[in-house]
Amino acid sequence: MKKIVQLKLVLLIVLAVGFGNSCHEENHHHADHQAHESSEKLSDLSLNNGVKWKTDSHTKLMMKSIHEILNQDIRLESAEYRILGEKVSEKIDKLISGCTMTGDSHAQLHVFLSKFIPAVKSLIRVEDSKQGAIMHTELKGLLKTYNEYFK
C-alpha cells in the first residue's frame, strides 16, 4: 500500500512539472531561463548530516545509465539533442517505476528530480543546436550536483 502511495506521489510531481512546462510558450529563451531556474531551486537539496544520501541499487543503476547517456562532449544537431532527451526521459520513467527508496533520502531524490525532469523536457523540445547545447550542459551540471548529494 505504501508503495502505491509513493508511486502516486511521484506521478503527481511528474505531471505537475510537465503541465507547468507545457504552459510556457517562450521557446527561444526557455532553455536559458530553465537552466538558471534549475540551478536556483537545487538550493533545497541538503546532505544527510554532512554525508551523501544512500540510494537503492535500482536508482544507482538508472542514474549511472543517465550519466552514460549525457556525459558526452559532442556538438549535436537539434534533432539529436531531442533524441538524447527522449533516451534520458525513458531512463527516468524506469527510475521512478522501480524506485524502492523511502524516508528522507527518497524526499531528497524528489527534490533533485523536480529540477532534473523539467530540464530533460526542455532538451526534448529544443528548436536548434544552440538551445540543445545549453540544456545538455545544464543537465551535465545537474548530474554533478546529483553526485555531490547521493551515493
Image (cartoon, grey):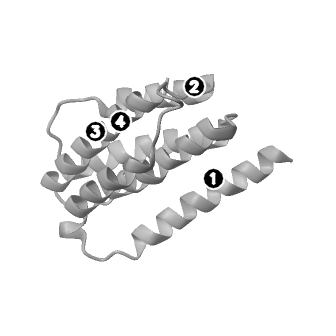
Circle nearer the N terminus (3, 2): 2
User: Closer to us: mark 3 or mark 2?
Assistant: 2
Circle nearer the N terminus (4, 1): 1
What's the amino acid at mark 4?
Thr
What's the amino acid at mark 3?
Gly
Q: Point out which mark residue 141 bears.
A: 3
Circle nearer the N terminus (3, 1): 1
Q: Measure how far apart labels 4 and 1 are at the Cα level.
A: 21 Å
Q: Secondary structure at mark 1?
A: helix
What's the amino acid at mark 2?
Lys
Q: Point out which mark residue 145 bears.
A: 4
The residue closer to the viewer here, 130 or 141, is: 141
Q: Measure how far apart labels 3 and 1 are at the Cα level.
A: 23 Å
Q: Name the residue at 56% across, 64% down.
A: 15
Q: Measure how far apart labels 3 and 2 are at the Cα level.
A: 20 Å
Relative to 74, 48 lies left or right: right
Relative to 55, 6 lies left or right: right
Q: Point out which mark residue 54 bears.
A: 2
Q: Name the residue at 25% across, 50% down.
A: 135
Task: Report which residue position mark 1 lands on.
Answer: 10
Q: Measure how far apart labels 2 and 1 are at the Cα level.
A: 19 Å
Circle nearer the N terminus (2, 1): 1
Q: Measure how far apart labels 4 and 3 are at the Cα level.
A: 6 Å
Residue 129 visible to the viewer = yes
Q: Name the residue at 38% across, 48% down.
A: 42
